[in-house]
Amino acid sequence: MVKFKIPFQRFSKFFLKPIPHLTSTNCIGIDVGTSSIKIVELSKIGARVKLENYGETSILTLYKNPFRTFEKNTLLLSSSDIGKIISAILEEAAIRTKTAIFTIPDFSTFFTNIELPQMSKKELPNAVNFAAPQYIPLPLSEVVLDWQLIEGKAGGRSKTKLKILLVAVPHEVINQYRKIAEITKLETKFLEAEAFALLRSLTKTDKITIGLVEIGAQSATCSIVDSGVLKSSHSLNIAGNEMTQSLAKTFSLSYKDAEKLKKKRGISPLLKEVQEQEEDKAAKVILFSVDSILVEVQRIFNNFSRSGKKEVQKVILAGGSAQLPGIREYFSSVLKKEVEIINPFVNIFYPPILEETLKEISPGYAIALGAALRGLE
C-alpha cells in the first residue's frame, strides 16, 4: 500500500462531558476540492450542534497542480489516492465516526428550472421524469435525477404553473464517490450537490432574496436563494485557479508560490483612494478574473429580476477565495449591494479559543459543514 506523508494544516478534537439521558448523533461532511480536502465532524445532543473536529490537507502537498481534470464535462478523480488521503486525515485526527456525507461539485452537476402545469402530488414525479429529457444534455440512462418544487403548490385549485428545480448528476461521478467511500470504509448516507450543502450552512436567510456566490478553485457558483429556498444555481468556469495560474505566468512563479502571492495581495491595493505608489501589478492580474466573475454574477441577477421575480437584496461570499483582501468591498461597490462573507460556524458550539481561527477559515469550510449538518437531520 502506498503511504502518504501528509502535513495536516488544521485538525482539532474537543471532548466535553455528555449530557445525561440524551443520545449523541455524529456525522462528518467531506468536501473533496480541487486544491484541498476538507472534513468537518459535528455532533448533536438534544438541540445543540457541536463542532467535534475539523481538518484539511492541501492537494499541492501531493501534486504540483490540482488533480481534477475535465473530459466531456465529466469530473475525473483519482479515487484510490483521494480515499487514502481521507483515511489518513481520519486516522491522524482520531475521527471514529463512520457516517459521512460527500458533496458533489456543482461543475459536475447540471441544474435547470422547468415549468409544469398544475397537477396532483401523485402525478408530479412522473411528469418531471417525462419532461426531463428536454432539458438534460445527457441521456437519462447516464444520470441520476433529483428535483424539488420551488414555486406553486401541487394539487392546488389555482391554475398557476409549478416551477421545478431539476438536478442531474452523471452516474460516473456518483460511482467515483462510492468508490472513495468503499476505500475509506465510510457509510455514505447521501451524496449531495454542493449548492444544497452551502445553502444549509447559511445561518439566517429571513424572507429576503440572497445571491450566494461561492468562489472555489476550479469553478465559481452563483445561486439565488429566496426565503431560504434555492431557486437557481449556475456554475461559472472562472475561479481561484485561474487567478493563481495567471499570477504564475505573469511572474514566472510555481503554482504554490503564485497561490501565496494571491492570498497576500488580493485586490486591496487597487481600492485605495490615493495611490502612494504604482498600482500593484499582482492585484491587477487578480482583478481581471474577479471582474469576469462579477460580469456573470450581474447577468444572473439581472435575468432573475427580469423573469418577474425579486431583486437580489444581499450577496454572501463563500469559498476559499472569498477571503482575498479587498474582494468583499469590491463586490459591494460594483453590485451596489450589501455583501458579507459567510460564517457557517456562528450557530455551532465550539471552544471560545477557536473564535478567530474559525472566522478566518469559515468561507472554505461552509460546504463540508453544510454536508455534516445534513447528516444530523
Image (cartoon, helix red, strand yellow):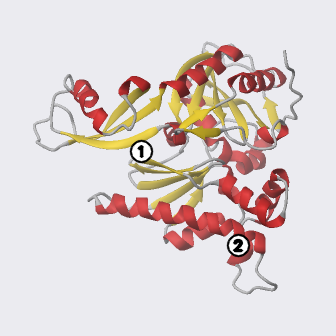
Residue type, numbered disc 2: Lys
Q: Nearer the viewer, mark 2 or mark 1?
A: 2
Counting from the top left corner in percent of width and height, residue 161 is at 18, 43
SS for tag 1?
Answer: loop
**Can you identify the residue that label 1 sits on?**
228
From the viewer's side, name the closer residue of 376 and 31: 31
Q: Determine the CA span between mark 2 and mark 1.
A: 36 Å
Mark 1 closeness class: few <14, some 14–19, many ≥20 residues within 10 Å: some
Counting from the top left corner in percent of width and height, residue 29 is at 63, 29
From the viewer's side, name the closer residue of 229 and 3: 3
Counting from the top left corner in percent of width and height, residue 294 is at 53, 64
Residue at 49% from the left image edge and 72% from the top image edge: 336
Task: Relative to 104, say whether 251 is above or below.
Answer: below
Residue type, numbered disc 1: Gly
Residue at 69% from the left image edge and 59% from the top image edge: 243
120 horizontally vs 128: left or right: left
**Can you identify the residue that label 2 sits on?**
284
18 horizontally vs 344: left or right: right
Residue 377 appears in the picture as rendered: no
310 horizontally vs 123: left or right: right
